[in-house]
Image: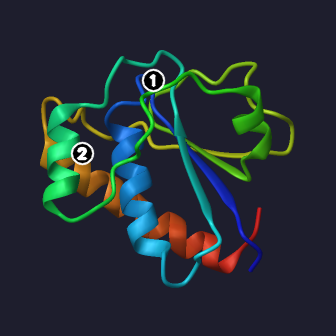
């Protein structure tokens, strides 16, 4: 399979998208080393959520070094897949870009471990789908 670019988006680019990117990178690093994993938001916060950063670091996962930022046209255009976790993407997504919505993830500020498990559950299914079918 050719390398894919996956853009994980949540409104604030501070928690859900950061977690999804870290866990996706962990799950795919060995089998899909060429995949590009990006994160962005539509209404970015100033910093990533401290509890999310602490959780990921405690698990030995790399936390995106970038600060939360607003998604760019270039990131949207580069994405083979966009995973939206609560973003309004109206008018943003280029034609022929595959989009999935994971709108059932609890807010990490209220249920950090529940958010983690929901993201991992989605990722297991998503990565399996990508291993079988290209966009």
* Above or below: residue 76 compared with residue 73: below
Residue topped by disc 1: 11
> Tags 2 and 1 in contact by the CB under 8 Å rule?
no
Q: Residue at x 61, y 27 (%)?
A: 71
Would residue 30 appear left or right of 82 to someone viewing this image?
left
Point out the tag, 2 or 1, that comes first from the N-terminus. Answer: 1
* Above or below: residue 16 compared with residue 68: below
The N terminus lies in quadrant:
bottom right
Q: Which mark is residue 115?
A: 2
Image x and y of residue 28, in percent: 49, 74
Q: Residue at x 15, y 46 (%)?
A: 54
**Secondary structure beneath label 1:** loop
Q: Residues within 10 Å of mark 1 (few under 14, many from 20)?
A: many
Q: Residue at x 41, y 58 (%)?
A: 122
Alpha carbon of mark 2 to alpha carbon of mark 1: how far?
15 Å
The C terminus lies in quadrant:
bottom right
């Amino acid at each position: 399979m050719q390398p894919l670019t996956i853009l994980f988006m949540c409104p604030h680019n501070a928690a859900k998208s950061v977690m999804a990117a870290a866990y996706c990178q962990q799950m795919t690093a060995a089998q899909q080393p060429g995949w590009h994993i990006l994160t962005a938001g539509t209404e970015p916060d100033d910093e990533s959520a401290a509890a999310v950063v602490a959780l990921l670091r405690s698990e030995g996962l790399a936390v995106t070094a970038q600060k939360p930022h607003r998604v760019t046209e270039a990131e949207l255009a580069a994405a083979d897949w966009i995973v939206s976790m609560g973003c309004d993407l109206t008018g943003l997504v280029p034609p022929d870009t595959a989009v999935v919505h994971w709108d059932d993830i609890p807010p990490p500020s209220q249920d950090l471990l529940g958010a983690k498990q929901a993201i991992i559950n989605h990722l297991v299914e998503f990565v399996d789908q990508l291993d079988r079918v290209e966009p």
